[in-house]
Image (spheres, rainbow, N blue to C red):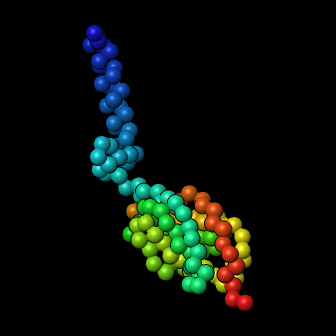
């Protein structure tokens, strides 16, 4: 059995933890009250050579146009949804493996995992 002193200490610690969560905006049960955007996650990439675009599949790409960078070069986003982004590739891209990052905007800024994409030559010959 618990003594009253032990229950009081557990209750106080729980109360203190809850107050800290509330003060720093951490979501509690049900996820209510959070303003932190969901982190975008890249699952796979594909290249359409004919259209000169990269197709990025994943999740949490948001409702506002995300920023896509390929090896630190910002790409023009043609269209996007919560689970897919299609971005134009520069015609000067040479065959290589590049890092791809998606940054979402809206209720805050969140950056995806760094994802490696291997691209063929895109440039016109």
Q: Quadrant of the N terminus?
A: top left
Locate residue 95, reporting x and y percent.
72, 74
At x 31%, y 31%, the residue is 15
The image quarter in which residue 51 lies? bottom right
Q: Is residue 68 above or below residue 35?
A: below
Q: Name the residue nearer the viewer: 75 or 37.
A: 75
Q: Quadrant of the C terminus?
A: bottom right
Q: Is residue 98 above or below residue 121?
A: above
At x 68%, y 75%, the residue is 120
Locate residue 124, reporting x and y percent.
69, 89
Residue 79 visible in this rendered orientation of the protein? yes
At x 50%, y 76%, the residue is 86
**How many numbered tags mark residues here?**
0
Locate residue 71, reporting x and y percent.
66, 68
Residue found at the far bottom of this picture: 125
Q: Name the residue nearer the viewer: 53 or 35.
A: 53
Q: Is residue 83 left or right of residue 30?
A: right
Residue 105 visible in this rendered orientation of the protein? no
Q: Name the residue nearer the viewer: 52 or 35.
A: 52
At x 52%, y 60%, the residue is 43
Locate residue 116, reporting x and y percent.
63, 62
Q: Is residue 60 above or below residue 85?
A: above
């Amino acid at each position: 059995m618990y003594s009253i002193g032990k229950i009081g200490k557990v209750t106080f610690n729980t109360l203190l933890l809850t107050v800290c969560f509330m003060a720093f905006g951490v979501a509690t049960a049900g996820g209510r009250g959070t303003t932190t955007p969901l982190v975008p996650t890249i699952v796979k990439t594909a290249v359409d050579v004919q259209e000169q675009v990269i197709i990025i599949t994943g999740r949490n790409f948001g409702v506002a146009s995300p920023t896509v960078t390929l090896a630190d070069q910002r790409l023009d986003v043609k269209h996007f949804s919560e689970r897919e982004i299609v971005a134009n590739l520069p015609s000067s891209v040479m065959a290589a493996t590049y890092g791809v990052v998606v940054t979402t905007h809206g209720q805050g800024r969140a950056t995806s995992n760094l994802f490696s994409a291997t691209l063929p030559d895109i440039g016109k010959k």
